[in-house]
Amino acid sequence: MVWLITLICVFLLPFFSPVLFNPGLPYFYGVLLFCLFCLAFSRREYFKRPQSCRLPLVYFVAIAILTSFFAISPGVAFYNAFYILLYVIIFIVIAALDTKRKKQICLALIAASCLVSVIALLQRFFYFDRIIPYIITQKPFLLSREFFYLMDIVRTKRVLSIFTTPNLFASYLVMINLAVLGYIFSGVKRSTALFLMFLLILNSYCLWLTGSFMGIISFLAGFSLFILILLYKDKKKLTRYAPILIIFFLGLLVIAVALVLQRWSGSLFRYNLSFASEERLKLWKFALAIIADRPWHFVGMGNFANICRNYMTADSPRSIMAHNLFMQLWIEIGFYGVLAFIWFLVRLTREAIRGIFNKDARFDSAVLRIGVISAIFAFLVHNMAGFSFFVPQVAIIWWILCALLIDNE
């Protein structure tokens, strides 16, 4: 019963966010944590063994909490540090599960994406034309920056499904798609493989509808890593499916080029790719200036927006995010916080390589890990110009995928 409730919670994760279900969010996470603690109690032998990823995570959480006491806004910092603690608890407990249960968790995440993408399609073909009159009636927001940004999304019909921006939706789809690839190549039944192929096409189409350039780029990066690792793991398997993979890769390239052409010549300047690129460059320059001025300082998790006010000029971009994972982490929890996070990534990569190329590992489990590590890598690539790492609705799924890489058998 506890395991069933856990799977239901995992399935519902993308549907719960501080924006959509703020009143019910604490109860939802409370149920999830209770189930995870019950599972942890049943796997207590595992926690007695040394695990290479635990120490960097302890440092990462400790730094996030300690910096909150000295943050510009302690309330904001502790709120965001709570989510970091939540992610780490979820990671540690799921990492302790056996391979069978990890596969079930992964399937729950994949199954949820089907419903998320269907909502996106309904939104694309039935919802956008009806929302314009409603937006215009919202006089308090008329002619504001948020109003024009939302209107640009509506005019270009960039789907966002249950997320707050198209880029967040794209970050989510990229991770799920690469996990689906892992399942397809793991030797599942033909009927299951056909359904997963359909889901991959559906999610990829929705990824295109988001209009997210970094979404496509990060998917290409993750897909390339998937092919590269699979090539080293099993050349025969890769050769067998080479035509399909080549066609899919060329399709992604065509989509990327088409999106560049569409966005580069777009009449709406906020949708124009050149404008988006210039804004990112301004943000990175702005963030680097803060780091150069305060290399050993920190402002606390979630306080990037507060420190920005002290540095903003007339030409500075108006954004509450740095749109770069490592720059924002450095500003918020300092150099040592970034170092702890990189340490975790190095240890996680080592664990993944060990699980993939272990001679005693089952082939299906190894290929699933290839899909998962490709998803984790693609998410990091996306966050070089995005901020989904700082949004619980998406970030929590990334941490779960990280946990699925750990081989404890």
Image (spheres, rainbow, N blue to C red):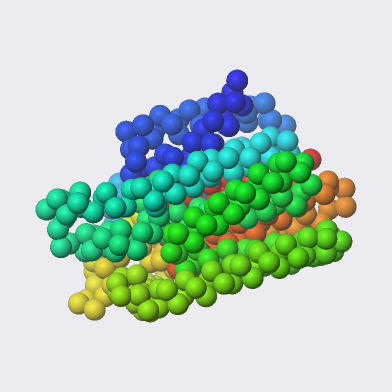
Instruction: Report x, y in % for residue 397.
Output: 53, 47
Image quarter hosting the N terminus: top right
Q: Residue furthest left?
A: 139
| x 52%, y 27%: residue | 34
| x 78%, y 60%: residue | 241
Image quarter hosting the C terminus: top right
| x 77%, y 65%: residue | 242
Residue 356 appears in view: yes
- Looking at the image, which is closer to me, 67 or 97? 97
Instruction: Report x, y in % for residue 301.
Output: 39, 54
- Looking at the image, which is closer to me, 223 or 309? 223
Q: Quadrant of residue 148?
A: bottom left
- Looking at the image, which is closer to me, 113 or 103? 113
| x 63%, y 42%: residue | 106
> Left or right: where does residue 244 sit relative to residue 308?
right
Looking at the picture, does residue 139 appear above or below residue 33?
below
Instruction: Report x, y in % for residue 134.
Output: 20, 49
